[in-house]
């Protein structure tokens, strides 16, 4: 059975609160050092956009405490910084996560609790911690995604019709060159391209398919550019007929 009249000093309050929260927590008290404090380094990590953030913006923190769970999760404990009673309890953002990892994650806004650490532990357990753990999980997931190199998009090889033949610019990779030559493409040094003859269209189509399958295995997409429709060489487009013209009316 707990003491019904516990010490409500901030340091003692935080120490008792740490023992009442679920999991394993430790408490570190940061006392007032006559204005020579480093508390800004702590308040800068307070993860709140509501009452606690408003209070910290309006008042200087003389002393505070930080509760740390065995997995690194931290809670900030401070006086109400005004004429109110009880304590401010706020989540602290993980210091090792990049700023981009917080994008789109709602802040687990803090709460004001009574000076009784036992009832405060219940308020934190059922109110603040569920929001805090959810936000932390989102940030950790985002940070892991940001740290994982994103796969580059697949390379592309363009095959272009040139008359009845198909041409490909000379690739830089030897394995791509091999995939082309093994499937009927012949290098034309004067043009610096590989050419697939169209003398046998069935063989040409089979070669394109086989080369495309091999290139796909190498992580390369194949794109076939068709020529624009145009009149056959040596012919002249037929002009559309002129509209009929009515004969002029002659009077007698």
Image: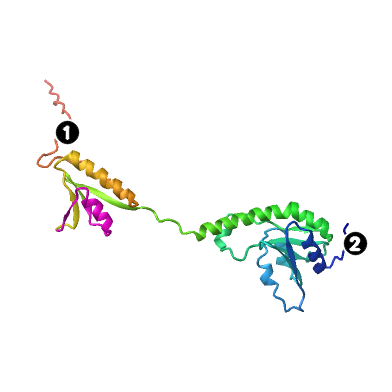
Give the residue drawn at x 70%, y 58%: 50
Where is residue 177? Give x, y as percent. 24, 55
Q: Is residue 48 left or right of residue 223?
A: right
- The residue tagged with tag 2: helix, strand or loop? loop
Asked if residue 228 shows in the view, the reply is: no
Of 236 and 53, the residue lying toward us: 53
- The residue tagged with tag 1: helix, strand or loop? loop
The region drawn magenta spans 168-189
Q: Which residue is mark 2?
A: 5
Q: Is residue 27 above or below residue 36?
A: above
Give the residue drawn at x 49%, y 59%: 148
Task: Assess whether residue 172 is covered by the magenta stretch.
Answer: yes
Where is residue 31? Give x, y as percent. 77, 74
Where is residue 16? Give x, y as percent. 81, 63
Give the residue drawn at x 26%, y 43%: 209
Task: Assess whether residue 187 is covered by the magenta stretch.
Answer: yes
Q: Which mark is residue 240?
A: 1
Lower position in the chain sequence, tag 1 or tag 2: 2
The quadrant in which residue 240 appears is: top left
């Amino acid at each position: 059975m707990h003491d019904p009249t516990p010490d409500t000093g901030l340091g003692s309050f935080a120490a008792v609160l740490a023992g009442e929260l679920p999991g394993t927590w430790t408490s570190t008290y940061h006392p007032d050092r006559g204005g020579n404090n480093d508390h800004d380094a702590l308040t800068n990590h307070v993860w709140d956009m509501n009452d606690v953030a408003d209070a910290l913006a309006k008042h200087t923190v003389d002393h505070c405490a930080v509760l740390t769970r065995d997995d690194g999760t931290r809670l900030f404990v401070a006086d109400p910084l005004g004429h109110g009673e009880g304590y401010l309890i706020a989540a602290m953002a993980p210091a090792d996560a990049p700023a981009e990892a917080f994008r789109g994650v709602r802040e687990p806004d803090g709460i004001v609790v009574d000076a009784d650490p036992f009832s405060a532990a219940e308020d934190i357990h059922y109110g603040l911690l569920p929001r805090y753990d959810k936000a932390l999980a989102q940030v950790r997931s985002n940070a892991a995604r940001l740290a994982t190199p994103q796969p580059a998009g697949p390379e592309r090889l363009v095959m272009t019709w040139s008359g009845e033949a198909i041409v490909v610019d000379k690739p830089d990779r030897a394995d791509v060159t091999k995939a082309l030559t093994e499937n009927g493409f012949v290098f034309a040094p004067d043009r610096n391209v590989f050419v697939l003859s169209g003398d046998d269209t069935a063989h040409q189509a089979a070669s394109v398919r086989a080369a495309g399958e091999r290139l796909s295995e190498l992580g390369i997409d194949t794109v076939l550019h068709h020529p624009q429709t145009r009149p056959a060489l040596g012919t002249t487009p037929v002009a559309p007929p002129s509209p009929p013209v009515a004969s002029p009316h002659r009077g007698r």
